[in-house]
Amino acid sequence: MPHARASDGIRIAYQVRGDGPPLVLLAGQANDHHWWDGVRGDFSGSRSTVTIDYRGTGDSDKPQLSYSTERFADDVVAVLDELDVDRADVYGTSMGGRVAQWLAVRHPCRVRALVLGCTSAGGRHGIDRGDGVRRSLIRSDPAEARQALLELMYTPAWLATHPGPYRTLGDRSMPAHARRGHLVASDGHDAWDALPGVLAPTLVLHGTDDLLNPTANAPLLAARIPGSRLELIQGARHAYFEECRELAGPLVLEFLDQKVRSR
């Protein structure tokens, strides 16, 4: 497994598949690159897809400290440097969308176009998932907590016909300190004041039935980023990109290809 070296010396594992213009795919909280397994092939036919294992996950180092969405964004830049990629399209979902926001703000010359899925600006302007959802995820019975997360990610109809394995429920190999670090990083994200400075053309995607990251975050995010485009996927929950891949994937590719032609 190849690695890039972050500015603080941490090794960041990365994976490259396919041919074509580079597309960075960023996963959700406490997940490694396998988050994208169900849909990666939808992009690899026309794109060189780049994924990473966040610090604390997969084959990357798992330090005790240094977890934040800003730090994760800088780790992505270390991977792009290792690959000699000057600019890439970036598609981040859930916490990955928060990382992608900082990537576009802190490193604008590295992001050609931006897709933000099922995410939020965070901070005081973010719409919280609510106490009921939070309680469902910390049940004492691990099986009940897992089922609650599954039902937040996918609709019952989809779960009935897709028995798994599910790649969006977290990296089980993560040590406890890394899980806490990811939680703190995602909960501490607040890019609201910086978002008007995003220069990359931006598409905001969200499922209309998302309770894990409430759908109301999407129009707030889109309104905060100049010239962005908002698309809501009817009936979809948090993992819209997988359950509704036949709609979401083409939406993303159409947006990215349009930006290639317009520049």
Image (tube, rainbow, N blue to C red):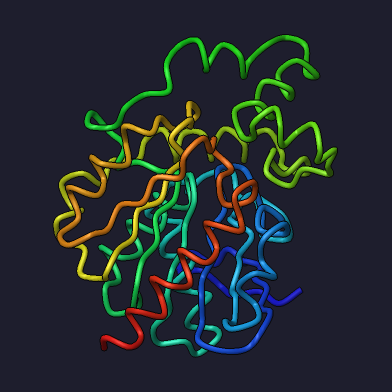
User: Where's residue 186, x and y in %?
Assistant: 44, 39
| Residue beneath the point at 42% across and 61% down | 73
76 in relation to 132, above or below:
below
**Total marks placed:** 0
4 in relation to 222, above or below:
below
Q: Is residue 241 left or right of residue 32?
A: left
| Residue beneath the point at 53% across and 75% down | 79
| Residue beneath the point at 30% across and 71% down | 107
User: Where's residue 244, x and y in %?
Assistant: 59, 49
Quadrant of the drawing holding the C terminus: bottom left
* Quarter occupied by residue 221: top left
Q: Is residue 61 visible?
A: no
User: Where's residue 223, x and y in %?
Assistant: 18, 47
Q: Is residue 156 visible?
A: yes
User: Where's residue 1, x and y in %?
Assistant: 76, 73
Q: Is residue 68 left or right of residue 122?
A: right
71 in relation to 81, above or below:
above
| Residue beneath the point at 32% across and 79% down | 259
* Quarter occupied by residue 37: bottom right
Q: Nearer the viewer, residue 78 or 35?
A: 35
* Quarter occupied by residue 188: top left
